[in-house]
Image (tube, rainbow, N blue to C red):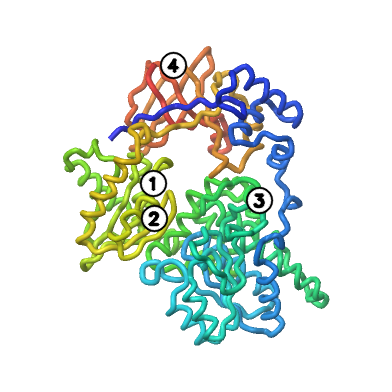
Amino acid sequence: MSVYKIWNLKFPSPSPDAPKCEAALFAGKLASEAGIAPLQAQLLINRNISDIKSVRSFISPSLRNMIDPMLMKGMKEATETIITSIAKQEKITIYGDYDADGLTATALLVNFFSDLGIPVSSYIPNRLNEGYGLNMEAVFRIAEKGSGLLITVDCGSSNFEEIEFAKKSGIKVVVTDHHQIPDGFQPLCPVVNPNQPGCPFPFKELAGVGLAFFLAVAVRAGLRKKDWFKSGSEPDLREYLDLVALGTVADRVPLLDQNRILVNSGMEVMKRSRWAGINAMQEVAAIPSSEITPYDLAFKLAPCLNAPGRMGDPDIGLQILTQNKNILAMDFAEKINAINKQRRGIEKEILAQIETILGETRGINDLKTIVISGEGWHKGVLGIVASRLVEKYHRPSLVIGIKDGMAYGSGRSIDNFNLYSALSRIKYVFEKFGGHAHAAGFSLKASNVRILKKELEAIAGETMREEDLIPTIDVDAEILLKDITPETLLLISALSPFGQGNPAPLFLSRSLEVLDSRVVGKRHLKFSVCREKEIFGAIGFGLANHHPLRGRTIDMIFTPEWNRWHGYESIQLKVVDLKNV
């Protein structure tokens, strides 16, 4: 299977068809009008941010620019329902999801109501036994415990029967969710979801924890109007923003607009977090609180928080986020770190088995999809394994575990293949399936796996071109080594936090001489490059197959970054791809 990548050098213009000189003039004009550097203007244009108002808002994200929560359809009814329950001193239950977004959203509301002195409990379903969203048995147990109000976070938009059952059981329900609204949607209770028809809230990309935060802001404002805080202190919701930042980055929603404001503010709050669990997780992950980055959230903290849910014990993930005792928080942090190591081991083992199977499969290079199954593969890691296959082979990939005649799978896809639409065409194969363009989950009889594999490949053959299977790297600009300075990194850092929707800038430098190279950590490439007496160290994660490089001339795509080690710092080039000249 091809690992060749297309390099797509962007031009700083609203139109890719504009002449190069006209594009440069546009970037210069935007820079002058917005009072920013031409490099920043080019990077922002590449991210479809090209009007003065949007540029200024992006450069200076502020909580003052948060949209009024009451613009969200259903927020008024949700707030009134919650405040009525508070006045009646009814027990409130927060029902979340088992991933990092759901856990942080649940913890945020549990902590918020606890700060208000309101009786509150929580429920996180077991991924392996209960699956995603509300389920009847869980609602029955919540009703038995006497809850008066059930608030969902990061789920609930599709749970018509469960909501109806809850209402018949005497439980009021408020749904907060950010997932797509299903066909035939008819709200049975107050629903806060910016994606529902007729919602005037202009930003549709909030994570579940972002919605929970907006709900808390609205409830606090409603209580304030009723003089609730006349005799007591009012919760400072800025203290909750580190939870919002963690869940938002973990859920990989675009770090633009409202999400950019929340994450930017939350990263600052995380440096002095109120929550014992956040501090303990940072300590176990060896992340200095003063230097925490979105990368640390996405690839160090979020995987640990996700791991218990994947392995079947999500309560630990919630307990660490609602724990106020440092000793217990550290104990939970060490437990989830150990569970994450276990998860990585299982993932690695399944990947090794898959590589063996792929190596023995005839005609594998001619396939446009990967559908692969194994007896007893752990359900909790199948989605991650599918993601790894997409990263490596750039093909829609389904990974399926088989047990007792049933098959359970997760799929991930590429931009040019809508996985949900494809599976919808062959829904007769499944017992159950759901998802969206890039990801799906499903179950089917083991005897139908062969049919699924054949039919999905046929659909891909009809709808995909050969070029769709070649990954593309979007490059922001071509740059000379002599132009990479501390000032350059300062200009780039002003556009952080980087992540989904706002990727770290990528630059192209040509005709670089490689002075040396060596393999580190088995898979990574460490080397030095030179041009016109300018020398920089470089690191290419997963690029060890290019060794040795010494004496060669290469073109290279990279992000410049600070490399700090034992008090010393230098500029290092983080390499994404390279080619021999």
| Residue 310, image x, y percentages | 39, 62
Label 2: which residue? 440
Quadrant holding the C terminus: top left
Circle 1 packing at 10 Å, graded few (<14), some (14-19), many (20+), is many
Q: Which residue is drawn at the image coordinates 18% and 43% (left, top)?
A: 361
Where, by quadrant of the figure, is residue 176 drawn?
bottom right
Picture layout, residue 486 above or below residue 353: above
Q: Which residue is drawn at the image coordinates 53% and 12% (left, top)?
A: 532
Is residue 77 visible to the viewer in this orientation of the structure?
A: yes
Q: CA distance from mark 1 to mark 3?
A: 27 Å
Residue 513's tag is: 4
> Looking at numbered disc 2 in the image, what kind of residue is underneath it?
Ala
Q: CA distance from mark 1 to mark 4?
A: 37 Å
Picture layout, residue 469 above or below residue 256: above
Q: What secondary structure is marked by label 1?
A: loop
Task: Name the front one of labels 1 and 4.
Answer: 1
